[in-house]
Amino acid sequence: MPDQRQSLLSKKQIEGKIKRMAYQILESNYQEERLYLAGIKGGGYLLAEKLKEQYDQIGEYKASLIAVDIDKQNPLSSPVSCDKTIDNPRDAVVILVDDVLNSGRTAMYALKPFLSLPLKKIESAFLVNRSHRLFPMSAKYTGIELSTTLKEHINVSWAAEDFGVYLV
């Protein structure tokens, strides 16, 4: 059976997008000593790790990683949890990270643990922004903006042998 996927971004292109996103995050947060990249488990956390790697190379301060655990299919079935707590949140900036922003549903529910904290600010970063919003969520930092139909699916593969963004 032939491959029904269309390649949208190669490994090299993704690496370039991540580097650019890290620079944009630094430009908006260059004075922030306490920056947390909160990656939604799965592709979001993998993207957060790669953003941290780039950010730490160029920034004066190092970013911290937080893993956000959420049931993407049924976010109300169990509590959204984080693997770390933020001490002294008044001085902290949190950037919610996921691989694809589609309807905004997952991202909105993933923010829940942070909404009860008096954070300095919350931003968001997504490798792919599909712009099919059903929830009031926007992307501050984006690798690529795509206009797709609702029937099309975006797949981000982080596997070494298949690293890329694909339209399915």
Image: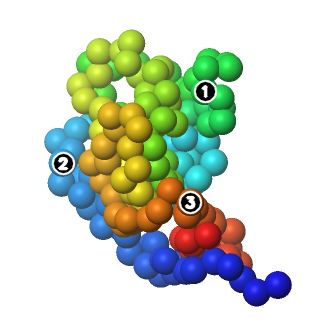
Say which label, 1 or 3, has the lower sequence index: 1
Say which label, 1 or 2, has the lower sequence index: 2
Q: Where is residue 32 in the image (x, y as percent from the top left)?
A: 22, 38
Q: Where is residue 76 in the image (x, y as percent from the top left)?
A: 61, 20
| Residue ID at (55%, 41%) | 40
| Residue ID at (33%, 34%) | 136
Residue 151: mark: 3
Label 1 CA crowd tier, 10 Å (few <14, some 14–19, many 20+): some
Specify whether residue 51 is in view.
Answer: no
Residue 75: mark: 1
**Figure check: 57 above or below 166:** above
* Amino acid type assigned to the residue bearing label 3 in the image: Lys
Say which label, 2 or 3, has the lower sequence index: 2
Label 2 CA crowd tier, 10 Å (few <14, some 14–19, many 20+): few
Residue 28: mark: 2
Mark 2 or 3: in front is 3
| Residue ID at (53%, 49%) | 44
* Residue contact between numbered discs 2 and 3, judged by CB atoms under 8 Å: no
The residues tagged by marks 1 and 2 sit, at their Cα atoms, a distance apart of 30 Å
Mark 1 or 2: in front is 1
Looking at the image, the residue that sits furthest to the right is 1
* Amino acid type assigned to the residue bearing label 1 in the image: Pro
The colour scheme used to paint the residues is: rainbow
Rendering quarter of residue 147: bottom left
Looking at the image, the residue that sits furthest to the bottom is 2
* Amino acid type assigned to the residue bearing label 2 in the image: Ser
* Residue contact between numbered discs 1 and 3, judged by CB atoms under 8 Å: no
Label 2 residue SS? helix
Mark 1 or 3: in front is 3
